[in-house]
Amino acid sequence: MMTEASIAPGPNDGRAADRQRMLDEIIAIASESVENHPAVALDPGVLSVMRRVPRHEFVPGVRRHAAYRDSPLDIGDGQTISQPFMVALMTSLLHLKPSDRVLEIGTGCGYQTAILAELAGEVFTVEIVESLAKRAATMLKHMGYANVHTRIGDGNSGWPEAAPFDCIIVTAAPDRMPDAIVAQLKEGGRMVIPVGGNEQTLKVVTKQGGGQISEGDIMPVRFVPFTRDAG
Ligand code: SAH
């Protein structure tokens, strides 16, 4: 877990007001969504981290002006950086503790990774697109996140050597619930994942003592597809 002092805080980077606006938008979307999807809930601890992590640093230069809009952004290689509301919601649903070991599948630009690293003990993150993985790893290191482990590879196999995990977050959508990844969740652990083809649903998976799995639906979502290594 990072301390407040260990990352350049917002106030001096000239983007604090932009971040506050982004937070206001996230909170507004959450309160609209909760009418139809009562499981939508944001954690104030997550919002306070998002108030200071410099999202624009993770966004490629040409898109940086839009870094604090509450929308997904193109990050190259046909991939997108998730909408800030979705980052806030998915992270909130994990109920992270400072001692947690977390697996993230789909590092993308690394912004979600940074939010996890602020709130959890250790983060293991896998990205299949090499250029994105390298760029995110460089940025996370540059920002001082010593508790993040990055890997280039196919997240379909999770990260077996570091399993089991207290929490798992998947930021691309597989057609079906991936059993190999659920298997890497600790008893008592939680996973947040979008599942489905054209119609996707954000789900929370919990594993009880004895390994029993239960699933809850949060809301309909749109994520890039969870791909599979051709080789
Ligand atoms: N959370 C990130 C990324 C969102 S896009 C962000 O906000 O920036 C989803 C990412 O999942 C993409 O970068 C995509 O390349 C990656 N991805 C898709 N299938 C994958 C797989 N099988 N293994 C690892 N990463 C995958």
Image (cartoon, grey):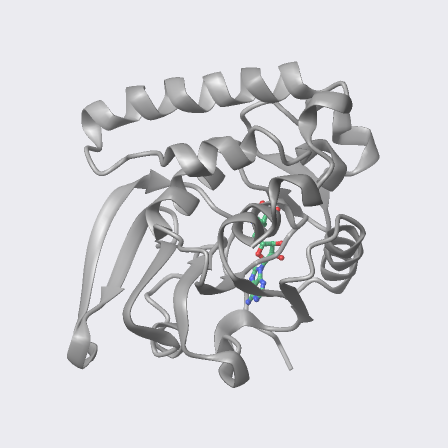
Image location (x, y in percent) of residue 19: 60, 22
Image location (x, y in percent) of residue 224: 52, 49
Please determine whether, in this image, residue 94 is positioned above or below residue 147: above
- Nearer the observer, 22 or 44: 44
Residue at image x 78%, y 38%? 60
- Nearer the observer, 87 or 230: 87
Query: Which quadrant does the C terminus fall into?
Result: bottom right
Query: Which quadrant does the N terminus fall into?
Result: bottom right
- Choose top left, top right, bottom left or bottom right for residue 82: top right
- Nearer the observer, 225 or 37: 37
Image location (x, y in percent) of residue 80: 62, 43
- Choose top left, top right, bottom left or bottom right for residue 7: top right
Q: Residue furthest bottom?
A: 161
Please determine whether, in this image, residue 200 is positioned above or below residue 180: above
Please determine whether, in this image, residue 55 is positioned above or below residue 138: above
In the displayed structure image, the side of residue 159 where residue 206 appears, left or right: left
Image-quarter location of ligand 1: bottom right
| Residue 200 visible in the snapshot | no
Residue at image x 38%, y 43%? 92
Image location (x, y in percent) of residue 190: 31, 61
Q: How many marks can you see?
A: 0
In the displayed structure image, the side of residue 10 where residue 223 appears, left or right: left
